[in-house]
Image (spheres, rainbow, N blue to C red):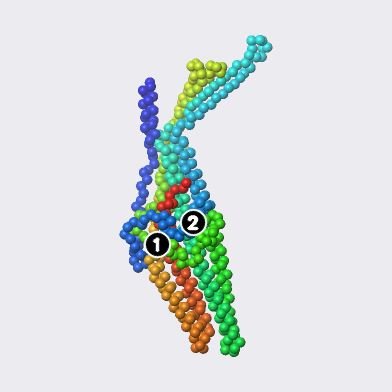
Amino acid sequence: MIGTRALLLASTLALAGCSLAPKTVLPTPPVPQSWPVGDAYLLQSEAALPILSYQSVFTDPRLQSLAEQALTNNRDLRVAYANVAAARAQARVTRSGQFPAVGISGGAGYSDGGGNGTSGGGGSGDFSLRGGVTAFEIDLFGKLANATESDRNRALATEAASRTVRLALIANLADAWATYGADRDLLKIAEDTAANARESVRLTKARLDGGVAPRTDLRQAEQILATAEDAIAQQRTALAQDENLIRLLVGGDVDRALLPTGLAEVTPAISSLPAGVNSQILLRRPDVIEAEYGLRAANADIGVARAQLFPSISLTGLLGFASNALSSLFDSGSFNWSGGGDITAPIFDAGGRRAGVAVSEAQRDAALAGYEGAIQTAFREVADALAVQGTIAERTRAAAANTEAAADTAMLTDARYKGGVDSFLASLDAQRSLYTARRSEIATQLLLVQTRIALFRALGGDSSAGSAP
């Protein structure tokens, strides 16, 4: 009899390893095997892109200090880490269903045996102590195991999502830091323009008083001054907003000594990332990893839904002691035990369970499309950044040459106006062109830095952004 029970137990355990979930097969990434090449692209290396930490990309100690503060205090990152902790705990909750739940209970009671008033009457007590397994489901078709696998993969997907938040936080902080430097430069340009305009107003008024210049020249000079003063106010507003954004990202107050004084400090502080030929590198991006774990979880959900089509078996067992006297509670005659099992099999549910399988399969197909879409989006983001990087050097040189030519034109035109050769309008146009050229050069230099940051973000290159604590 014991041998038969052992054989049945072994058979049950063997069946418990069965799983109805389909095997997860990742599709071939739906992107080319190499980055685009051509006039707009700069192919820098045949080697695979190295995995770099943000410290090796953003080399300025001030920016690194701000990044460390942000990784400690940023509230969005705290929310992401809390979500990871909740997902991990939920996976443990689901996994606990694969094991028997063992409990213990005890009781004591007393009843008065009197009522007839005789001296022989008295009370009696009942004492019990029981422990056992309640409703342990044998996982014949892998329903519980697949549910655990699904929640485990969702926890891993949540962890990858937290890495996306961390990576975006560092990139956004670097971008805000660079923008602050650019706005400092733009403020200086506006202040220089306003200073020149004040001097122009003074000289023009003197010429007007001397009967050399018409009143229209003075009014036009005053317009230039008013425009420059308005630009100063706008740039001061922009700087204040830049500080507010940096403060939000850091999650606290910001020491202004950690902020750049201009793009001349920003550009060398943010390294350029070389692009690798093989686009398989995108598979390490945290959003792609998140989509992959979502696909694996959807496959496990199919196994759970399929297992619902088959019978479920639950076992219960109880053993303990019961006695009418506490002193004899653990005597051999007080021991008793019981056991039992239940089987539940679906017969008719109007196709509900099969519809559940269809739902999980459709969700798997959606997860598969989402996984492929994440890879395609990642490829596009990297390719766009490389397109800018491939031409930004020419644009920077052109912007610098334009500024130099505009400055020379403004100087010559002003000299010609003072010499009575050109009109004051020509001098004003030259000043406007110089102002526009200087602002355009700052915008191009900022774009160069932002492209490097975009590549850092698009390639998911922060190796220190591993897992949530």
At a point 53% along the width and 16% down the height, the residue shown is 328
Which quadrant holds residue 325? top right
Q: Earlier in the sequence, mark 2 or mark 1?
A: 2
Determine whether the residue tagged by mark 1 lies in a helix, strand or loop.
loop
The residue to which callout 2 is attached is 65
Q: Is 75 displayed left or right of 390 in the figure? A: right
In the displayed structure, 435 sits above or below 299; it is: below
Q: Residue 290: percent from the left, percent from the top?
A: 43, 50
Q: Is 374 displayed left or right of 249 in the figure? A: left
Q: Residue 12: percent from the left, percent from the top?
A: 39, 30
The residue to which callout 1 is attached is 272
Q: In front: 324, or 81? A: 81
Determine whether the residue tagged by mark 2 lies in a helix, strand or loop.
helix
Which disc is residue 283 wearing? Answer: none
| Quadrant position of the N terminus in the picture | top left
Q: Amino acid at mark 1?
A: Ser
In the displayed structure, 374 sits above or below 418; it is: above
Number of marks in the image? 2
Q: Amino acid at mark 2?
A: Ser
Q: Residue 382: percent from the left, percent from the top?
A: 40, 60
Q: In front: 93, or 81? A: 81
Asked whether residue 231 appears in the rendered view, the answer is: yes
At a point 37% along the width and 43% down the height, the residue shown is 22
In the displayed structure, 355 sits above or below 248; it is: above
